[in-house]
Image: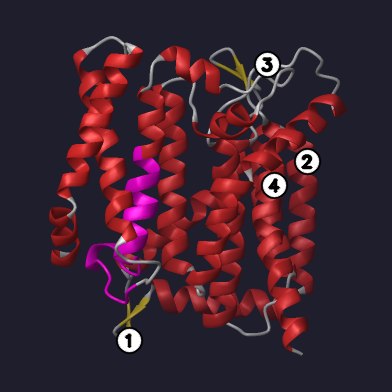
Amino acid sequence: MGKLFKLFEKNFDNFIIGFIAGLVIYFLTISKQGTLNTALIIFFSGLFLLSIYTLSNYFNKFEKNVFKFLSKITEAEFLFYLIAIPSFLVLIYLLPNWINNFFKLNLNQPNIISIFFSNYTHQGLGHLVSNLGAYLLLILLILNFETNKKEFHFFSIFAFLIFPFIIYPTTIFFFYLFKITNFPPTLGFSGIVALFNGYFIYCLYKYLKKNAFKDLKLGFIIFLLLFNITTWGFFNYFYIGLISLVLLIFFIITNLEAAKNLIIFLNSKLFLQNRKNRVNLKNFVIFMFTLIPLVSLIALLPKELISNGSLINTPVHFFSLLIGLFLPYLYEKIKIRNIK
């Protein structure tokens, strides 16, 4: 922790540069009204550049030292995932309305800037807070459960830099499929959040395979996905939830050994502490937070498709979750075959 503060202190001049940059942005663009927004855009400009400059000192060398209160998260990961990315999102939100409107993706008149930046622009504060909160939860869980951090770092590059350009044609495809001709402007970080949501399900599968039972098959990922669809179905479309529940029960019956091993593993983590039958509070809290992404379709695919006058792009949310879930799994399979 002390080393991180020294790096911040060493690069504090970069914060001043960012602070001045934020001030210039404000005066040149006539920022949103209000003293608070003015102060925030200046502050987050500095914080974003400070975190990037400080991160550059690592030269992609991820150290083994971790923050005690953040478990397995390294200082470099803390700077990038928990400081730089949130600061970038807040900074874009605080930009003047005319810039944010330019970032909104008009599907009839797309351009490279809007295709990319629409994924980091938000309709309002509630939109930003919900997406940012979901993102932070997923990142904290992934960085604690991930068994191969290097793979996740490469996946993050794909998520932040490449996936926005996949979201656009996917949106066009689904809009045409559902015969939506009056294309509304699209924006929001939720497509990338859904991608990380899918990755977390895969990450949980890898963690359990490594720590609980080595013979865990792809079917377990299907089980987790069915669990998500079941909870979503009962909240929105009862018969879909019922069908998914039947499939879920069938899966458990045909995989009793895997279910048994999972129950034993969870029991040892949650209740057996110092050989006493009492709740391990820390693991129980982590377990409860883990359940949130496993029922995420309730939020990603709401029954009401219009929110604050904007269309919720539910097909892309589901598509993103599936890509985040199966893309790293396919990569692992290809890697294993190449090794053989």
Number of other residues with Cα within 10 Å of mark 3, as a class: few under 14, some 14 to 19, many 20 or more: some
Q: Earlier in the sequence, mark 1 or mark 4?
A: 4
- Residue that mark 3 sits on: 184
Name the residue located 60 percent from the left edge and 39 percent from the top edge. 191
Q: Which mark is residue 72?
A: none
Q: Position of residue 169 (x, y in %)?
A: 76, 35
Q: CA distance from mark 3 to mark 4?
A: 27 Å
Secondary structure found at label 3: loop
- Residue type at the position of mark 4: Ile
Q: Which mark is residue 229?
A: 4
Q: Quadrant of the N terminus?
A: bottom left
Number of other residues with Cα within 10 Å of mark 1, as a class: few under 14, some 14 to 19, many 20 or more: few
Q: CA distance from mark 1 to mark 4?
A: 37 Å
Q: Nearer the viewer, mark 1 or mark 4?
A: 4
Secondary structure found at label 4: helix
Is 173 magenta? The answer is no
- Residue that mark 1 sits on: 275
Name the residue located 38 percent from the left edge and 63 percent from the top edge. 284
Number of other residues with Cα within 10 Å of mark 4, as a class: few under 14, some 14 to 19, many 20 or more: many
Quadrant location of residue 69?
bottom left
Q: Position of residue 180 (x, y in %)?
A: 81, 18
Q: Which residues are magenta?
A: 63-87
Quadrant location of residue 277?
bottom left
Instruction: Confirm whether residue 260 shows in the render.
Output: yes
- Residue type at the position of mark 3: Pro
Q: CA distance from mark 4 to mark 2?
A: 8 Å
